[in-house]
Structures are given as C-alpha cells and as structure tokens.
Image (tube, grey):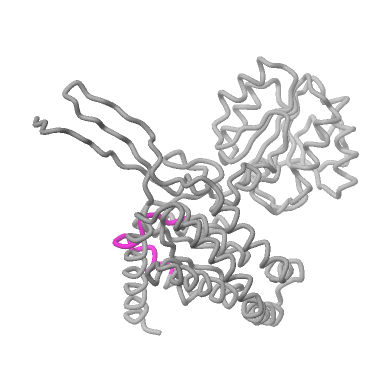
C-alpha cells in the first residue's frame, strides 16, 4: 500500500477516534460499566472466532521458527479468553476515575476554582505483547473515558484484529459511536512512524515492548509518551535483616519470572554480612540455575561466581543471570541504585529503621520496597484490576498505570460577575 493511502486510512481512524472520545468523555459512569460488561460478554460469545484467528497466528509463528515457550504465551484458549473477560468486568466494577474533585479553592473575590479529573481523549498504544493486552488496554482506556488506537505486534495480528473488532462492536451496541476501539491494520514500521505524527488526533501514546521499540517511539512521537525503557531492579541486603526471608525474597524476585520488567537484576549486599550470607544465598541461587556475576569480594567468598563487568550493573538480563555487588552501608547502596538503575523497582531487606527511612527517602525509583519482592510492581497486585504499563517518568504518572493514571484534569471556575 502506498504511503498516501496509509495516511488516508490513518486520518479516517483518527477522526473516528476523536468522535468516539467526545462521546466517552461525557458518558455517565453507569453507562461505562454497561459498555465494559457488554465487551466482556462479546469476548465470551466470540471465543470460537478469536481462537480461530489465534490459530492462524500460531501457524504463522511456527512457520517463522518461534520457540514453543513464546508460542504458549501467544496462544489463546477458552480459559484465557474467559480471564480476559473477567479482567474487563473487574475494571468495570472499580470506582469511576472521571469527575473526581482533586481540589477546590475559594478566592477572596468569590471565585470558586475546582480541579476535576477528565479523560485524555484518544490514547495510542503500541505493544509487542500477548493478545490479552488488546482487551486490557481497551478496558482501562474506556473506564477512564478515552478512545483507544492500538498497534499490536505482527505475531498476534490476527488475534488482535478479532479481539479489537469484537470490543468495538460491543461498544457500538451500547450506543457509542464507531471507533471506541480501533486497531491499526498494518504491522510495518512505516505505519507506526505515521501514527506517531498524529498529534492532531492522539493525545497520549504508550509503548509496551523492548527498549528499542520504546526509544523509537520517544524519538518519533509528536505527542506526549508514557514509558519505561527497561527494568534494572535492585535489592539491598542490609547488615541486620531476616536472612532466611532475604533469601526467599531474592529467589522470588529473580526466579519466579525472570523475563519480566519487575524481576531482580542486581543484588547489593552489605559487606559486614557477606562471609555468612553469601554462601547461604549462593546455594539457593545455584539450585535455581542462576548464573551469578559478582564483584571481587563476592567472588572470593563464592568462587563459582563469574567476575562482573561494569556493563553487568547496567544490564536488564531478563534471564537467570544476577549481578551482585558488595557495598559499605545503605548510603553506598542508594548511590549505586541511583547511578545504575532504571528508576523502576528497588528494595531494601532490613531490620534497621534508620536505614529503611534513608533508603525509602533517597532511592529515586517509581516503586520502593521494604522487606518484599520487586515482583509486586504490577497493576493487578496494586489493586488496579489491570494495568496499561509501568511508567518510570516523573511527569503525570509513575509506576503501575491503571485507569486513574489515564486521566488528566481541568479547572472549572465559577463566578457571579467578577471581572479582573
């Protein structure tokens, strides 16, 4: 297809999304609940259609040599579709994020200034993930009163097309305009570049995927971007702590799902407990098949560990590899995290209240943990039902983003004839 034709189709998509967003912005909370439940019902009713489309994706993936572990993530079963529907119903049941009074100020001249939460309008989401993201993203956006334009990965194109179509038709059945949920009908990069110039129609774009995708989106987008580049997550084991609990937390953070952004990548150990703690930890990590890459002090205590390089402390491995460094106290631990980390999720394992207070105050991360695994950085675990992603930005949203984070605000000023 010629670029001029792609532009024409994208223009049509943008106009439909803008009309749908205008309707969603003033939709009562109860009507959004009806819409989301209708969408959930649509997924269940369309399960056979979705699985048929998904089988095409799986067949294509096998022809292209995708490994079976990734194919399993791509696969949609009746149970997984039911879980998608349940996610929509859970989002529907949450408190409406639109119309909240965020603040009110009565001025000396009698003006009443009210700060109120409102939808963004149209949100674009570019993702390289499982097809369930299509339903999650649509549900959260609609709950917050936004229309959504989706661009999924090529591996799940047929599945995403089927799911988005069902969701948009379900919304239309509740009286909303066509265009509440739309999927870009191409997966080539040229279409993405053009989409990222649609600031006339798209108010905010959220990329979900690898670091290269996110950096491309940030470089190309002419609208605001909410993102995180990578998850270089740390835990610091303090001089006084529950050592058995520390080992359990570390194993969970590193091994439960090593390929996710909230998995542990670098462990910091206070040098005072290294001789006793390191062998105990190394035995547990070895049983899980973790490759340890340590500094000189750690390698002297744990000879089977490999020497770590400077690059290891910047690395997001997304596999069973763990960088380990010895530090002299909490201040050095925080300095390391703020230098090498990605401002995602970092934690301290400690019994020392003063050190915990220092760590939580000085660690510059979206989510800071005390005596718990970093694996809890997730919208579902935070009680959001689902999430649109994790943000390591500081403007607007930070950490797991649910429906609340997909609203902005405006000021409503009420007077009775005041002039300046």
Q: Is 332 or 393 nearer to us in this picture?
A: 393
Q: Position of residue 275 (x, y in %)?
A: 86, 25
Residue in the image at 65% along x and 75% along y: 47
Q: Position of residue 152 (x, y in %)?
A: 53, 68
- Is 196 covered by the magenta stretch? yes
- Is 262 covered by the magenta stretch? no
**For residue 40, what is the image quadrant?**
bottom right
**For residue 92, what is the image quadrant?**
bottom right
**For residue 127, what is the image quadrant?**
bottom right
Q: Is residue 55 left or right of residue 19?
A: right
The correct choice, above or below, for 279 with respect to 392 in the image is above
Q: Position of residue 395 (x, y in %)?
A: 42, 40
- How many marks can you see? 0
Q: Is 353 or 301 nearer to us in this picture?
A: 353
Residue in the image at 67% along x and 61% along y: 83
Image quarter (top left, top right, bottom left or bottom right) of the C terminus: top left
Q: Is residue 262 left or right of residue 191?
A: right
**Residue furthest bottom in the image:** 1
Image quarter (top left, top right, bottom left or bottom right) of the N terminus: bottom left
**Residue furthest top in the image:** 354
Q: Position of residue 215 (x, y in %)?
A: 48, 55
Q: Is 161 or 38 nearer to us in this picture?
A: 38
The correct choice, above or below, for 307 with respect to 12 in the image is above
Residue in the image at 34% along x and 54% along y: 26
Q: Is residue 49 left or right of residue 189?
A: right
The correct choice, above or below, for 419 with respect to 17 in the image is above
The correct choice, above or below, for 362 with respect to 378 in the image is above
Magenta segment:
192-206
């Amino acid at each position: 297809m010629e670029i001029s034709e792609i532009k024409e189709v994208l223009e049509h998509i943008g106009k439909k999304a803008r009309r749908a967003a205008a309707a969603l912005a003033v939709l009562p909370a109860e009507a959004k609940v009806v819409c989301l439940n209708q969408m959930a019902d649509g997924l269940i009713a369309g399960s056979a259609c979705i699985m048929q489309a998904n089988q095409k994706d799986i067949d294509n993936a096998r022809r292209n040599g995708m490994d079976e572990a990734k194919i399993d993530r791509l696969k949609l079963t009746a149970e997984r579709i039911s879980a998608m529907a349940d996610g929509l119903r859970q989002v529907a049941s949450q408190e409406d994020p639109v119309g909240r009074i965020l603040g009110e100020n009565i001025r000396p001249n009698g003006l009443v200034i009210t700060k109120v939460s409102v939808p963004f309008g149209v949100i674009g989401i570019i993702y390289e993930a499982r097809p369930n993201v299509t339903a999650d993203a649509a549900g959260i956006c609609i709950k917050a009163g936004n229309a959504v334009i989706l661009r999924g990965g090529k591996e799940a194109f047929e599945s995403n097309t089927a799911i988005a179509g069902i969701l948009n038709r379900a919304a239309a059945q509740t009286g909303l305009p066509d265009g509440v949920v739309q999927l870009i009908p191409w997966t080539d990069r040229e279409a993405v570049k053009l989409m990222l110039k649609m600031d006339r129609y798209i108010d905010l774009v959220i990329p979900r995927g690898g670091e290269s995708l996110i950096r491309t989106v940030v470089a190309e987008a002419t609208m605001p971007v909410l993102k995180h580049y990578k998850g270089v997550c740390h835990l610091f084991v303090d001089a006084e702590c529950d050592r058995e609990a520390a080992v359990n937390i570390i194993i969970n953070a590193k091994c439960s799902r090593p390929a996710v952004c909230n998995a542990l990548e670098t462990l910091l150990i206070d040098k005072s407990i290294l001789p006793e703690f390191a062998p105990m930890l190394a035995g547990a990590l070895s049983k899980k098949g973790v490759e340890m890459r340590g500094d000189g002090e750690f390698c002297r205590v744990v000879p089977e560990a490999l020497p770590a390089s400077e690059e290891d402390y910047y690395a997001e491995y997304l596999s069973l590899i763990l960088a380990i460094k010895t530090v002299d106290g909490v201040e050095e631990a925080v300095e390391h995290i703020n230098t090498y980390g990605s401002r995602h999720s970092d934690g301290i394992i400690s019994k020392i209240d003063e050190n915990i207070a220092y760590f939580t105050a000085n660690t510059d991360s979206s989510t800071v943990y005390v005596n718990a695994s970093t694996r809890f950085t997730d919208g579902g675990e935070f009680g959001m039902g689902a999430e649109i992603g994790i943000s390591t930005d500081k403007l607007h949203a930070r950490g797991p983003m649910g429906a609340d984070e997909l609203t902005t605000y405006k000021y409503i000023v009420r007077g009775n004839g005041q002039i300046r």
